[in-house]
Image (cartoon, helix red, strand yellow):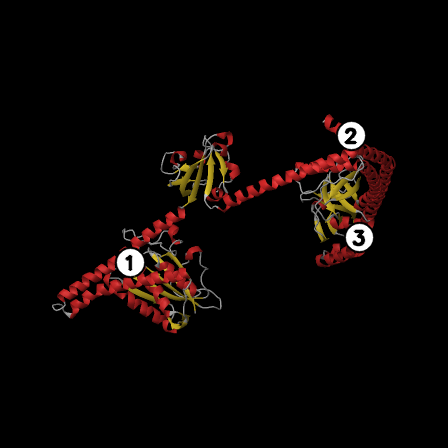
Amino acid sequence: MKLAWFKVWSNLSTRITVSLIGLVLLTALAVGAPAIILLRHQLNEQAWLQVRQTSQITQALYAAKKSQLASLATLTAQRPTLARLLEQSDQSHLLAYLHTLQLGTRLDGLLICTLTGDIVAEVGQPMPSAICQATLVSPIFVDSQLTPPHVWLLARHDIVDLSYKVVVGAALDNYFTQQLGEQTGLQQTLFWQKVIVATNFKQPFNPDITSDNGNLCFNLADIPYYATLTPLESPDLAMLVALDVSQIAMTQQQLSGWLIAVMVTIITLSSVIGIGLAHQISRPLARLEDAAAHFSQGQLDTPVKVKTHLREVLLLAQTIELARTKLKHNLNELRAEKEWSENLLRAIVEGIVTLDANGRITFFSHGAERITGWSAVEVMGRLGDELFILLDTPELFSQLIPPPGRRRKVTLKLEGEQAVILAITGAHLLPSAVKGGERGVAIVFRDISEEEAVHRLLSDFLANITHEFRTPLSALNASLELLLDEAEDLSAVEMRELLKPTHLSLISLQTLIDNLLETSSIEAGRFTIRPRPTQLHQILTEAIHIIQPLLERRRQTLTIAESLSLTELNLMADPTRLVQVLVNLLSNASKYSPLGSEINVWVEEQLPPLAPPMSGGNQVQLPPDVGGAGGGKQRWVRISVADQGSGIPMAEQGQLFRRFVRLHNPNGEQYGVGLGLYVVKTIVEAHGGQVGVADRPGGGALFWFELPL
């Protein structure tokens, strides 16, 4: 520390500048500091004087209020009309008379009590009944049962020749302190036993009133106040008079700021003059110092130019400029080579990792960061076997690195338990390419997880589609062979029964082919609908006609519940597409329902739809048995197909409307290739509708879709 300070102080320009600034600073402080202190003291004394004078005025106003109450109590007790009304016990006229007196005298409360403490009449604000029973040793009465306590300033006078007394009161509340504030111009707060009972402060207020001399300083809502605490009737009852000194503080700050600004200006001008003189003396050396600093930061673009008449300094500047030129040329060549290498590695999508002889990572490319999710900073120097953990095998990663020219697939567990399949190739590095001169290895890997998933999905799809085609074709083949062999011996009824499974197989094939074609057009972006005026009952009739052979084969019945006439329901839709939707839903309901069961179809009007579709088309809102709900202007129709199967677990409902997702059958049979519900959702949403699935009451599944009318 001492050495650094010595180096700074030994600089000529520093000595000149510091000496001049120090001299000016001492002069400014000697003149400006006493002026600022004297100014602050004078303003504070004036503020405290105003607070003390206002406190005396407040005491005088309180004394006047107390005297006024005593006079009003006496005048009220001596009124003949009051005595006459009390003798006549005319309560209604008595209350009216007292109310007039209370309004005319602006009293907060007026009581007529018996000498035994019973209240005869009361007008104005409600006063505690204990006021009549109390002996008024002090004009102050405090109702401590309220929070905060309610304080009354009272005066009492007995009515001559009658066993009554008059009690008049003024509530020492916020209105009282507001009046005092308007008369004195300062903030007023009344305390009873250090608890605020009335104040004209608008903000919550809780100052520390434990002061020996009665003077207080506090802040409220960032506003400073000077205050004095003055007892009224007793030490328990005190009035706090507060003065907002923000303007005084602002004036102090402005005057102090002006003086400080003058001093800063003088110091600044002196500093500029000192720096200018020092700069004129040490300019050549400062330019060389800046050039050296730029060199250390790698800034080599600025030439070193020094204007001086000193020969030694000029030769030094020329030598530094020559060194700068050569260094810049070498650095540009190295930078170009580095950028070429980095761009090449960044363009390679495969991950590249190098390991030293101990298996620690020495290089981690951008491709490796994208594939693994790790950054190069967090993996450098770590063991490859610690990061690349193999799944389903106890072997280490380093043991499965293939020899040069070979390729190997491995499954790794990355961060967050994510599994990834990598195709890895390896190569040996020259000793000079690895830190320490030891022989290492370079690994190039590529993420083939999606390719493997696509291969598995394609294999499963081909297996499913082959099975789905083989079953109806086998039935067709068997039926046709039997027809060819026994056609002459079969009756018309037997031939009809033999043709039913043939027709059913053709329906199954037609549905499967339609779904495959629709899926292909959807994926290719060629899917369209051709809406035209269509009657809903025609669509239902055609769909039921197509699906009827399947229902007869499985001995199932189909019932349709209508909450409105189907012949009156017309909508703009593509009838061919909607028939395909109903055939898919009815076919699924038949396949996944028990033999001999009943399939229900509900048709009802919705105003508007019950709820927007959830993610994946899933919906858990069940339709009512009769009629619809809603109050919008748009009319909608909902068609629901309910089966009596085993139902669909809630966890699987959100995935049903995706491609290649097949319904689970508890009997172990799987139908279709998982495209029917995907096609249903696409067709319904193309019509501006929505589709969903829910549990059927009593067991089974309920698929529904809604369309605008």
Which numbered disc flags the more N-terminal residue, 2 or 1?
A: 2
Query: Which residue, given by chain and number where applicable, does mark 2 sit on?
Result: 9
Mark 2: amino acid: Trp
Quadrant for the N terminus in the image: top right
Q: Is residue 532 above or below residue 683?
A: below
For label 2, the crowd category at 10 Å Cα-Cα, with few meaning under 14, some 14 to 19 and many 20 or more, is some
Mark 3: amino acid: Thr
Query: Which residue, given by chain and number where applicable, does mark 1 sit on?
Result: 591
For label 3, the crowd category at 10 Å Cα-Cα, with few meaning under 14, some 14 to 19 and many 20 or more, is many
Distance from the alpha carbon under mark 3 to that under mark 2: 91 Å
Which residue occupies the extreme top position in the image?
Answer: 2
Query: Which residue, given by chain and number where applicable, does mark 3 sit on?
Result: 76
| Disc 3 and disc 2 in contact, CB within 8 angstroms | no
Quadrant for the C terminus in the image: bottom left
Q: Secondary structure at mark 1?
A: helix
Q: Is residue 257 left or right of residue 605?
A: right
* Front label number (3 vs 1): 1
| Disc 2 and disc 1 in contact, CB within 8 angstroms | no
Res. 428 in view: yes
Res. 593 in view: no
Q: Position of residue 569 (x, y in %)?
A: 39, 72
For label 1, the crowd category at 10 Å Cα-Cα, with few meaning under 14, some 14 to 19 and many 20 or more, is some
Q: Is residue 5 left or right of residue 639?
A: right
Q: Is residue 692 above or below residue 210?
A: below
Mark 1: amino acid: Lys
Q: Nearer the viewer, residue 227 or 678?
A: 678
Which residue occupies the extreme left position in the image?
Answer: 489
Quadrant of res 474: bottom left
Q: Position of residue 14 (x, y in %)?
A: 79, 33
Distance from the alpha carbon under mark 3 to that under mark 1: 101 Å
Q: Secondary structure at mark 3?
A: helix
